Image (tube, rainbow, N blue to C red):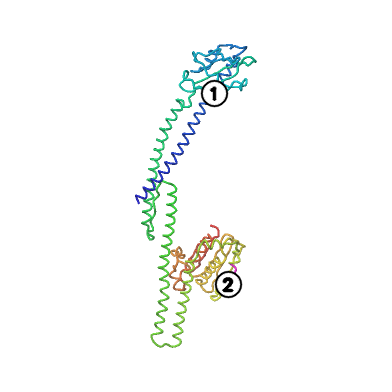
């Protein structure tokens, strides 16, 4: 693992170094090129200003002021100026600045025929007598007649790699590699810390146990992306652990609930086979077996319903449904069952209610609620049903539920002791109801007083 982490870190640093090196090289090239262009433009701008002033000072074949006085106006450390007369293919230097001393600027090779008055022409000369580097020369026409031409030349030392540029290049050559090293060191520290945290996370993941319900991977606080991944993983693990816990409890309760009727069936069959029985006794044994078999069938069907219910599939089947139609249909279907106990069913309110949901599953839930109300009501009583836009209320007058057991009635296989002694049931009906209502986002609550009444309320909008 350590070798793998080291290789990953080396590859990351290697490619990052190449990338940053390329970026810094391009940046250095662009910067040096920009400095050179700026220096070049600065020299030309200075020469242009001097030249315009000289042309302005020239009048009637002479300067109003000497060229040295004009030159001194610009406070330039080194500035070469000379006036040249060209007549009959001969050239004569009429005047030169003090900086030139006894030397002169090259003018014989200049193509003066292509010059135009009021234009300035730039060239670069090499003159070791004047400067170690090249000289930037600006040339313009002062006077042009048929017999002669007078031109003025201004020049300054021109070094494409001046001291300023050389210092900048030197700083780049020293600074950029140093910056690259600092970045790589900092990156190495960050990567090492991140990879070590990743290793710690991997070790924690390896130690996950499904039945260890307090498990939680700690955040690294190094990278937000890793922490978000850890939080997502923790959430997933919690859901898996909760599901595992429910499945384990469900399996335990289911095995207990199925074991009891199977034991009864086996016992009754053993009794019937032990010796010859009368027809009436066999009928009684078969009735008991039938009853327990029906109980087993009902329990298994409900277990399968709870196990196979997929919330997303049910939600994808939601449509606009009429709740009042469903309630009225279920009430009419359950009237014969209520009539067997001489129980009347009254619809106190039945408003026009439209909701977004699955009609089949909601009908199952309401049907189960009414069956429970009938099953646990006293004979010769009534059941009141009320539907408004906000809620559905079902009230029966029967056995009721003790206050300390109301919070448990939606648990799977949970049955109130007093109710168990008076009516059969698997303890899954209310769990199915709660599952269906939770998928729809509805809230169910129960109010009850023992041996008086039970009120079940479903609120449509939480």
Pointers 2 and 1 in contact (C-beta within 8 Å): no
Queried whether the magenta region covers residue 330, the answer comes back as yes
Queried whether the magenta region covers residue 142, the answer comes back as no
Q: Residue at x 57, y 73 (%)?
A: 335
Q: Which of marks 2 and 1 is nearer the N terminus?
A: 1
Q: Could you tell me what secondary structure mostly forms the magenta stretch?
A: helix
Find the magenta span and give its range. 327-335
User: Considering only vertical position in the picture, is 97 above or below 383?
Assistant: above
Q: Which of 210 and 275 is in front in this view?
A: 210
Instruction: Estimate the x, y position of residue 378 in percent, counting from the top left.
Output: 51, 72
What residue sits right under mark 1 in the picture?
123
User: Considering only vertical position in the picture, is 365 above or below 159?
Assistant: below
Camera-side mark, 2 or 1: 1
Instruction: Estimate the x, y position of residue 211 in percent, counting from the top left.
Output: 38, 61
- For label 2, the crowd category at 10 Å Cα-Cα, with few meaning under 14, some 14 to 19 and many 20 or more, is few
**Which SS class for mark 1?**
strand
Q: Nearer the viewer, residue 62 or 171?
A: 62
Label count reads 2
**Which SS class for mark 2?**
helix
What residue sits right under mark 2 in the picture?
333
Instruction: Estimate the x, y position of residue 55 in percent, counting from the top left.
Output: 59, 17
User: Considering only vertical position in the picture, is 339 above or below 218?
Assistant: below
């Amino acid at each position: 693992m350590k070798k793998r982490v080291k290789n990953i870190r080396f590859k990351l640093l290697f490619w990052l170094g190449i990338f940053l090196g390329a970026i810094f090289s391009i940046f250095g090239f662009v910067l040096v090129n920009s400095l050179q262009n700026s220096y070049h433009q600065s020299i030309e701008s200075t020469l242009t200003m001097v030249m315009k002033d000289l042309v302005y000072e020239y009048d009637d074949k002479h300067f109003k002021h000497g060229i040295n006085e004009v030159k001194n106006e610009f406070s330039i450390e080194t500035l070469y100026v000379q006036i040249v007369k060209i007549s009959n293919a001969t050239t004569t230097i009429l005047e030169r600045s003090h900086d030139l001393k006894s030397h002169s600027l090259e003018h014989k090779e200049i193509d003066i025929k292509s010059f135009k008055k009021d234009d300035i022409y730039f060239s670069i000369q090499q003159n070791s007598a004047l400067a170690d580097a090249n000289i930037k020369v600006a040339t313009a026409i002062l006077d042009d007649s048929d017999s002669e031409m007078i031109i003025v030349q201004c020049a300054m030392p021109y070094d494409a790699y001046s001291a300023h540029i050389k210092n900048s290049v030197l700083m780049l050559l020293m600074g950029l590699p140093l910056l690259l090293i600092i970045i790589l060191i900092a990156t190495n520290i960050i990567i090492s810390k991140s990879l070590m945290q990743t290793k710690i996370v991997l070790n924690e993941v390896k130690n996950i146990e499904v039945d260890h319900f307090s498990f939680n991977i700690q955040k690294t606080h190094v990278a937000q992306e890793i922490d978000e991944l850890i939080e997502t993983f923790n959430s997933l693990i919690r859901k898996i652990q909760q599901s595992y816990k429910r499945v384990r409890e469900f399996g335990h309760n289911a095995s207990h609930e199925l074991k009891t009727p199977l034991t009864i069936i086996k016992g009754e069959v053993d009794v019937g086979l032990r010796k010859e029985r009368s027809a009436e006794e066999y009928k009684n044994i078969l009735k008991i077996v039938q009853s327990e078999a029906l109980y087993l069938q009902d329990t298994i069907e409900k277990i399968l319903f709870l196990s196979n219910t997929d919330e997303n599939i049910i939600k994808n089947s939601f449509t606009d449904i009429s709740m009042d139609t469903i309630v009225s249909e279920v009430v009419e279907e359950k009237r014969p069952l209520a009539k067997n106990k001489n129980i009347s069913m009254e619809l106190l309110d039945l408003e026009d209610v439209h909701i977004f949901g699955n009609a089949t599953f909601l009908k199952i839930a309401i049907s189960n609620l009414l069956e429970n109300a009938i099953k646990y009501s006293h004979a010769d009583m009534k059941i009141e049903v009320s539907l408004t836009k906000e809620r559905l209320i079902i009230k029966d007058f029967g056995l009721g539920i003790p206050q300390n057991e109301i919070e448990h009635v939606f648990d799977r296989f949970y049955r109130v002791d007093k109710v168990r002694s008076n009516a059969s049931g698997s303890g899954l009906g209310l769990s199915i109801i709660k599952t269906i209502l939770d998928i729809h986002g509805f809230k169910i609550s129960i109010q009850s007083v023992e041996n008086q009444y039970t009120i079940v309320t479903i609120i449509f909008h939480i």
